[in-house]
Image (spheres, rainbow, N blue to C red):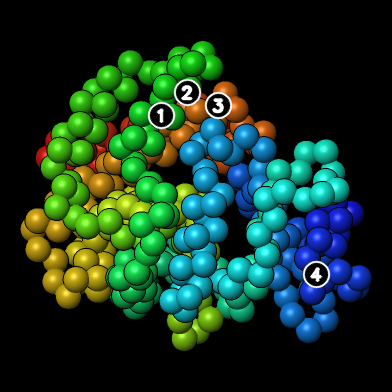
């Protein structure tokens, strides 16, 4: 695979002919990720996974979001976008994105629970949502995404659990209540701990493949769901973001927390049919992953009063 990476990087003019040290970074689900060092600078190459458009991943949208975050000082500078190459470096090549390496460390789930880190993330996310975005950046709509994933899973003969009928009723209720009066902004939509890079002074956001124009409360709820924040932590997080935690904002966070787990569940059921990589541990299958998030969504719905 490293020979394939070298073949891709030969299409980047400022790296052509250079002696590069290349290493793979484990953990990508819909990309294969590599670090390349030329002796002076370091870069990250994200080689796009095949079939990821089925998951609604729009690489032009990812590029635009990555560039917007970088311009605001919240992300990695784009060095090259390589959607097609001639000659094709290898048979399965379907695009790549090269960004400048961001020094610092990827956060983990334990670090994110720290009150000071929660505050920093709240401030960073507010800055992200304030970035001016081009109306041409495609939208990410969690409600449409969930329905699309479920339709595609059914079309591929995935047997969805009967509980999804109740989940879709909840989804309609959330859609009707949240975000109608919220303007669109730049949203990340996949706020895992490891998508934050901390250089000791500032936080940056990486991995924008699900990014797009969206509603800020989905990011807020998505972060709370992914990190399983306690009610106290949710309140502290909202204080960092808004300067206060009103009952209305707490309720919106809780509703979008449910929507986040429903998105993750529907993603898992679709991946059961199309995945080219092993499922996350310790689930054993993407179906089990989908069930775990569906059950978590129902538990969160009780807290939200659904």
Which mark, residue 30? none
Q: Kindly state the secondary structure of the residue where label 2 is placed.
A: helix
- First in sequence: mark 1 or mark 4? 4
Q: Which tag is nearer the camera, tag 4 or tag 3?
A: 4
Q: Which tag is nearer the camera, tag 1 or tag 4?
A: 4
Tag 1 near tag 4, CB within 8 Å: no
Closest to the observer, 123 or 254:
123
Q: Spatial distance from mark 1 to mark 3, Cα to Cα?
A: 15 Å
Residue denoted by label 1: 148
Q: For residue 248, which quarter of the picture?
A: bottom left
- First in sequence: mark 1 or mark 3? 1
The percent position of residue 57, horizontal first and vertical second, equals: 52, 43
Q: Spatial distance from mark 1 to mark 2, Cα to Cα?
A: 6 Å
Q: For residue 90, which quarter of the picture?
A: top right
Residue denoted by label 2: 152
The percent position of residue 277, horizontal first and vertical second, equals: 66, 37
Horizontal side, residue 263 vs residue 100: left or right: left
Residue denoted by label 4: 13
299 shown above or below 183 = above
Q: Kindly state the secondary structure of the residue where label 4 is placed.
A: loop
- Graded by Cα atoms within 10 Å as few (under 14), some (14 to 19) or many (20 or more), the crowding at tag 4 reads few
Q: Which tag is nearer the camera, tag 1 or tag 3?
A: 1
Residue at 34% x, 43% y: name it: 141
Q: Kindly state the secondary structure of the residue where label 1 is placed.
A: helix
- First in sequence: mark 4 or mark 3? 4
Q: Is residue 232 visible?
A: yes
**Residue most toward the left?**
247
Residue denoted by label 3: 272
């Amino acid at each position: 695979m490293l020979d394939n990476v070298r073949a891709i990087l030969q299409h980047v003019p400022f790296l052509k002919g250079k002696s590069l040290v290349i290493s793979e970074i484990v953990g990508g689900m819909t990309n294969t990720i590599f670090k390349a060092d030329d002796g002076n600078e370091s870069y990250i190459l994200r080689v796009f996974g095949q079939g990821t458009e089925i998951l609604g991943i729009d690489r032009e949208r990812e590029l635009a979001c990555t560039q917007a975050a970088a311009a605001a000082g919240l992300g990695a500078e784009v060095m090259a976008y390589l959607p097609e190459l001639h000659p094709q470096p290898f048979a399965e090549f379907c695009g790549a994105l090269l960004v400048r390496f961001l020094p610092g460390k990827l956060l983990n789930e334990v670090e994110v629970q720290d009150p000071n880190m929660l505050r920093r993330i709240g401030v960073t996310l507010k800055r992200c949502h304030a970035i001016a975005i081009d109306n041409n950046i495609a939208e990410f709509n969690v409600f449409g995404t969930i329905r699309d994933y479920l339709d595609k899973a059914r079309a591929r003969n995935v047997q969805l659990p009967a509980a999804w009928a109740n989940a879709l009723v909840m989804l309609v209720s959330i859609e009707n209540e949240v975000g109608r009066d919220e303007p669109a902004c730049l949203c990340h939509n996949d706020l895992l701990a490891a998508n934050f890079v901390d250089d000791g002074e500032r936080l940056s956001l990486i991995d924008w493949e699900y990014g797009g124009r969206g509603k800020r409360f989905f990011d807020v709820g998505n972060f709370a769901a992914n990190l399983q924040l306690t009610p106290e932590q949710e309140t502290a997080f909202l204080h960092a973001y808004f300067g206060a935690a009103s009952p209305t904002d707490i309720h919106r966070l809780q509703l979008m927390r449910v929507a986040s787990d429903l998105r993750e569940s529907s993603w898992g059921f679709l991946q059961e049919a199309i995945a080219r990589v092993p499922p996350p541990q310790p689930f054993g299958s993407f179906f089990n992953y989908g069930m775990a998030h569906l059950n978590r969504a129902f538990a969160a719905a009780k807290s939200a009063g659904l």
